[in-house]
Image (tube, rainbow, N blue to C red):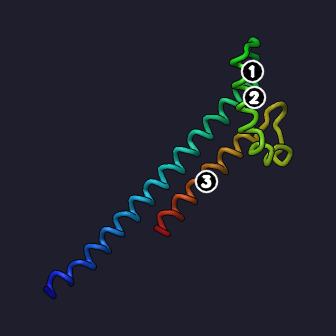
Amino acid sequence: MGVGTAKTPAVGVQATLTVLADTASSLQSFVSVFVGIYVLLIFAYVLLSWIQLPYSGVAATVQRFLDEVCRPYLGLFRGRIPTIGPLDLSPIVAVVVLLVAAELVNRLIGALL
């Protein structure tokens, strides 16, 4: 009976560590996917700001959605990053900052869990 009880805590600890590792991996995947999608939304926002689409309800809805989702984050960088002629570099800096922050968050998750 003493042998069986000695192995039980080790199995419980191993199961807990496995669950924590799986949770960390899932959180890291979520952060990576979320940031990847947000970068794509920023890219679409920038492209649609350069291209004049013919008016349609769908195009207006998409542009309004991208504006509501991307403008607050990009607004943190606009006016603080100098432009090169007509080229606004703030979306590039915003994407780089977002990617670096995602990497730091993923490493922090890995270190904590």
Q: Determine the CA span between mark 2 and mark 3.
A: 27 Å
> Residue at image x 75%, y 33%?
67
Question: Label 3's element?
Answer: helix
Within 10 Å of the Cα at label 3, are there few (<14), some (14-19), or many (20+) other Cα atoms? few
Which one is closest to the eye, mark 2 or mark 3?
A: 2
Which one is closest to the eye, mark 3 or mark 1?
A: 1
**Residue identified by numbered label 1:** 60
Residue 64 coordinates in the image, percent (x, y): 75, 28
Lower sequence index among marks 3 and 1: 1
Q: Amino acid at mark 1?
A: Ala
55 w.r.t. 100: above or below? above
Question: Label 1's element?
Answer: helix
Q: Which mark is residue 75?
A: none
Q: Determine the CA span between mark 1 and mark 2.
A: 6 Å
Label pair 1/2, CB-CB below 8 angstroms: yes
Label pair 3/1, CB-CB below 8 angstroms: no
Residue 105 coordinates in the image, percent (x, y): 57, 59
Q: Determine the CA span between mark 3 and mark 1.
A: 32 Å
Q: Amino acid at mark 3?
A: Val
> Residue at image x 39%, y 63%?
21
**Residue identified by numbered label 2:** 64
Question: Label 2's element?
Answer: helix
Q: Nearer the viewer, residue 53 or 82?
A: 53
- Left or right relative to 29: residue 38: right
Question: Hey, which quadrant is residue 24 in on the image?
Answer: bottom left
**Residue identified by numbered label 3:** 100
